Image: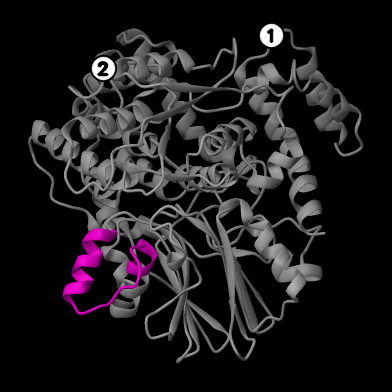
């Protein structure tokens, strides 16, 4: 896990190169190095976070044995041991024990399609000195970032936009925000090639690009719909199959030469991961290099806040006989200002990133370089309030159950009331019919993506189609982007077992009733965790999510900031009225803080990111 950067046919001074490497130092604090071709037309740079094969031999830019190819690679290949053995049988030679070299040798041997054999996350550039061409690529779901800009006849690339803008120098459009960003579409631009900064683009998830003769030819190598599988007809068989997949996904992600931790909220998702890690340790699973140092759990806590979940995390750790590291987040004592936190994560989002940044910083300070977390479950198992999308494929009794399940995620209690369900359903139908008018009035465009025309997509039920969109197009790509920045800001790698491509393909091959039912969301996961995770967590209904308690912080820790904003020339009169309205609230709710944040975010973001990083 690292930071990568480079330039082709684009001149950079030695001072500028140092600035680029320094801008990515947080992603790879262990070692920094670069390569310059003899003709000066190719420059590759790498900042390393050492996780597999800690020796200097595994540093990058890494050369092939023959010296023809060089690679800069950001990510992890979890099945690298199995792939290495296969490549050795094919006659390939290795000089390190790293997963990077396995990836390098595999690409040389099999080309871009080698990515199909890999289980992991990655972004890379492979330069072929003989053919004078570069291959760029990104993992299936976009867990690792890869930005680029084409300037005149040259091309520059990097893991973060701040490194791109460093290389662009005076060419950086410091006063121009890309059209993809507005307050209404925070979740609707990550799947696009463009970014929030005009002139900066990204290689899309599941795509690769070949750069030759000053031209970048981009192609798609992965579509989940092309890899759906035949699933067991019997639900119990589905549970058993999923359980084995998930255990193996966690097992191979525990391969590490450094200590492993986990971000634990006490909810079903993260609790499942740490419980499986304990289960694997108890079973002394084979093919695992080390099980000695994984027992490090970290939980973000807001003292006396309405959205604090640390008591649940403590309950999980007590059940598993593990120590819990509680990270108390207080805006009054944070080293992060609002502006600095926005600059660090680069892209705008619906909540303040300070709690996330501080949590992974605490991990890093404790010597943890790898965190195995539970991301991706909500998008795979209907963790959001979109259950009624299934109503077009549901019976009346199922609709009543779906409404009761959705209400239980807020109240924590499940109770089917048919009379209120009918009212709720009628309101949903009215809202659904008026939604196109609302979107048109507010300038919100429908998300259109090519997979909507795929035969396998057209066969899916309505809820599975909706999940496919939020997993591949809107919500999850945005969260993956964010968590890469949160964790890598302190040199911590996040591994996500639920996003193992085998699991993703299996779950999108299932009907929605396997994911929602028996009065719960995430039905299949809850049943698969029986005997591994304690029942009180399996049966937990309420959902909070990891957000900053802005409704409370704007009243306390950031009250002076808010007053300053209300008087600042940065904001127009309309925004100032919203700020003053919030200030007048005696007991604001979470949604009040989120609404205010969305109003002030565009201005704060522009000041923190564009005006700062493009200077």
Callout 1 environment at 10 Å: few (<14), some (14 to 19), or many (20+)? few
Instruction: Examine the image and state in which quarter residue 376 appears.
Output: top left
Mark 2 residue element: loop
Q: Position of residue 65 (x, y in %)?
A: 37, 81
Q: Position of residue 299 (x, y in %)?
A: 49, 25
| Residue 197 left/right relative to 394 | right
Is 97 in front, or is 521? 97
Residue 92 on the magenta span = yes
Instruction: Examine the image and state in which quarter residue 613 appears.
Output: bottom right
Tag in front: 2 or 1? 2
In the image, is residue 546 above or below residue 555?
Answer: below
Is 244 in front, or is 59? 59
In the image, is residue 439 above or below residue 134?
Answer: above
In the image, is residue 198 above or below residue 410?
Answer: below
| 2 or 1: tag closer to the N-terminus | 2
Mark 1 residue element: loop
Callout 2 environment at 10 Å: few (<14), some (14 to 19), or many (20+)? some
Disc 1 marks which residue?
587
Looking at the image, which residue is at 44% across and 24% down?
265
Looking at the image, which residue is at 33% across and 77% down?
111
How far apart marks 2 and 1 lie (CA) works out to 36 Å
Residue 69 on the magenta span = no
| Residue 523 left/right relative to 7 | left
Instruction: Examine the image and state in which quarter residue 466 appears.
Output: top left
Disc 2 marks which residue?
534
In the image, is residue 249 above or below residue 94?
Answer: above
Specify the principal SS of the magenta part.
Answer: helix
Q: Position of residue 481 (x, y in %)?
A: 53, 48
Q: Which residues are magenta?
A: 80-102
């Amino acid at each position: 896990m690292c930071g990568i950067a480079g330039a082709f046919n684009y001149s950079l001074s030695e001072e500028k190169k140092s600035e680029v490497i320094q801008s990515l130092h947080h992603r790879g604090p262990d070692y920094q190095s670069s390569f310059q071709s003899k003709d000066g037309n190719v420059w590759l740079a790498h900042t390393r976070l050492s996780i597999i094969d800690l020796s200097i031999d595994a540093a990058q830019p890494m050369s092939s044995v023959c010296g023809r190819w060089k690679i800069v690679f950001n990510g992890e290949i979890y099945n690298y041991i199995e792939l290495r053995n296969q490549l050795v049988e094919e006659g390939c030679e290795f000089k390190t024990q790293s997963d990077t070299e396995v990836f390098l040798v595999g690409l040389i041997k099999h080309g871009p399609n080698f990515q199909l054999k890999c289980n992991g996350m990655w972004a890379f550039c492979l330069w072929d000195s003989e053919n004078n061409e570069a291959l760029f690529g990104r993992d299936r779901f976009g867990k690792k970032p890869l930005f680029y800009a084409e300037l005149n006849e040259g091309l520059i690339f990097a893991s973060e936009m701040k490194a791109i803008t460093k290389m662009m120098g005076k060419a950086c459009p410091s006063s121009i925000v890309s059209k993809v960003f507005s307050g209404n579409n925070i979740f609707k631009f990550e799947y696009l090639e463009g970014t929030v900064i005009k002139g900066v683009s990204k290689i899309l998830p599941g795509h690769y690009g070949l750069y030759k003769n000053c031209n970048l030819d981009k192609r798609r190598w992965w579509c989940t719909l092309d890899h759906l599988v035949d699933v067991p007809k019997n639900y119990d068989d589905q549970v058993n199959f999923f359980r084995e997949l998930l255990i193996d996904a966690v097992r191979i992600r525990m391969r590490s030469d450094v200590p492993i931790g986990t971000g634990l909220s006490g909810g079903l998702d993260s609790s499942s991961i740490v419980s499986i890690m304990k289960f694997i340790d108890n079973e002394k699973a084979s093919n695992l290099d080390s099980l000695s140092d994984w027992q490090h759990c970290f939980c973000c806590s807001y003292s006396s806040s309405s959205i604090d979940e640390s008591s649940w995390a403590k309950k999980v750790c007590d059940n598993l006989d593990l120590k819990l590291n509680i990270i108390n987040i207080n805006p009054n004592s944070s080293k992060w200002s609002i502006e600095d936190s926005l600059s660090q994560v680069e892209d705008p989002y619906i909540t303040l990133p300070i709690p996330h940044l501080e949590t992974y910083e605490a991990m890093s300070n404790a010597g943890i370089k790898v965190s195995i977390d539970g991301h991706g479950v909500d998008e795979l198992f209907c963790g959001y309030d979109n259950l009624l999308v299934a109503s077009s494929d549901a019976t009346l009794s199922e609709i009543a159950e779906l409404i009761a399940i959705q209400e239980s995620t807020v109240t924590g209690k499940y109770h089917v009331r048919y009379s209120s369900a009918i009212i709720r359903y009628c309101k949903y139908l009215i809202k659904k019919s008026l939604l196109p008018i609302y979107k048109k009035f507010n300038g919100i465009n429908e998300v259109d993506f090519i997979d909507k025309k795929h035969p396998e997509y057209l066969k899916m039920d309505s809820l599975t189609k909706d999940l496919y969109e939020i997993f591949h197009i809107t919500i999850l790509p945005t969260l993956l982007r964010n968590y890469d920045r949160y964790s890598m800001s302190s040199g911590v790698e996040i591994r996500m077992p639920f996003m193992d491509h085998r699991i993703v393909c299996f779950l999108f091959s299932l009907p929605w009733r396997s994911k929602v039912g028996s009065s719960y969301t995430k039905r299949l996961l809850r049943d698969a965790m029986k005997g591994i995770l304690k029942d009180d967590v399996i049966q937990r209904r309420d959902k909070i999510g990891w957000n900053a308690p802005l409704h409370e912080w704007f009243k306390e820790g950031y009250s002076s900031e808010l007053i300053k904003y209300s008087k600042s020339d940065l904001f127009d009169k309309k925004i100032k009225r919203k700020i003053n309205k919030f200030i007048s609230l005696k007991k604001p709710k979470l949604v009040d803080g989120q609404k205010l944040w969305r109003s002030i975010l565009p201005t704060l973001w522009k000041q923190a990111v564009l005006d700062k990083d493009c200077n």
